[in-house]
Amino acid sequence: MFNLASKLMELIALSLDLPAKRFVEFFEDHASYLRLNHYPPFPSPDLALGVGRHKDVGALTILAQDDVGGLEVKRKPDGEWVLVKPSPDSYIINVGDIIQVWSNDAYESVEHRVKLNSEKERFSIPFFLNPAHYTMVKPLEELTDERNPAKYKAYNWGKFVVTRKRSNFMKLNVENVQISHFRVSE
């Protein structure tokens, strides 16, 4: 999965008119991981979510899912939730917050959620491509200039993800940290 993710990062770099290997340095000591998700059937799927709405905080997510479905993405123009129809022998690729910041908003992290099924269990296997914990995430200098200034302040990936995950286990008195907190005011 890491090799596939690395190839996708090369393609993203090329799409931004950067050298193919531009992102390699960030992943030498990567903190990527694979997870197995199980969503049991739920008799009233409209009353609960398998996973609430969110954007992935890492660089990329490569998702393998079964044929049950349940993944929904938020369509930007009208805010409607749209089911992502499972496609056999394929992966779903989500651009994460880090690519949004590195690309200075040329790419945008996608908001998504998982709905439960009333009759069938669902399995999915996401691979989360994350840089080293010591990585400072900020718009790449090659993609910023006077006409296109940096839209985000730099932040430490490790501190960001630790703060974000803490809210999974305790109620914080502040909103869960988001990349929008690092957006430069215009």
Image (cartoon, rainbow, N blue to C red):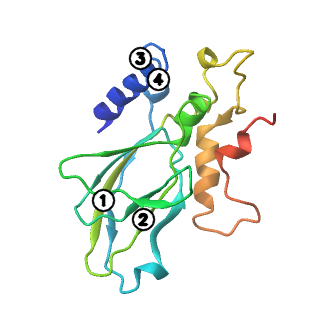
How far separated are the C-alphas under marks 1 and 4?
27 Å
Extreme residue in the front direction: 78
Extreme residue in the bottom direction: 43
Q: Which residue is mark 4?
A: 23
Amino acid of disc 1: Ser
Q: Which residue is mark 1?
A: 124
Q: Which residue is mark 2?
A: 114
Residue 116 image point, x, y percent:
38, 73
CB within 8 Å, label 4 to label 3: yes
Discs 2/1, front: 2
Residue 31 image point, x, y percent:
45, 40
Q: Quadrant of residue 85?
A: bottom left
CB within 8 Å, label 2 to label 1: yes
Residue 46 image point, x, y percent:
45, 79
CB within 8 Å, label 3 to label 2: no
Residue 141, label in figure: none
Q: Would residue 101 be found to the left or right of residue 186 on screen?
A: left
How far separated are the C-alphas under marks 1 and 3?
30 Å
Q: Quadrant of residue 104?
A: top right
CB within 8 Å, label 1 to label 4: no
* Labels 3 and 2: the sequence-earlier one: 3
Residue 70 image point, x, y percent:
35, 65
Q: Which residue corresponds to the image point at 40% horizontal and 85% vertical from the top-left?
A: 44
Q: Which residue is mark 3?
A: 21
Does dot 2 land on a helix, a strand or a loop?
Answer: strand
- The relative height of residue 53 versus residue 185 in the rendered view (above or below) is below
How far separated are the C-alphas under marks 3 and 2?
33 Å
How far separated are the C-alphas under marks 4 and 2?
30 Å
Q: Quadrant of residue 134?
A: top right
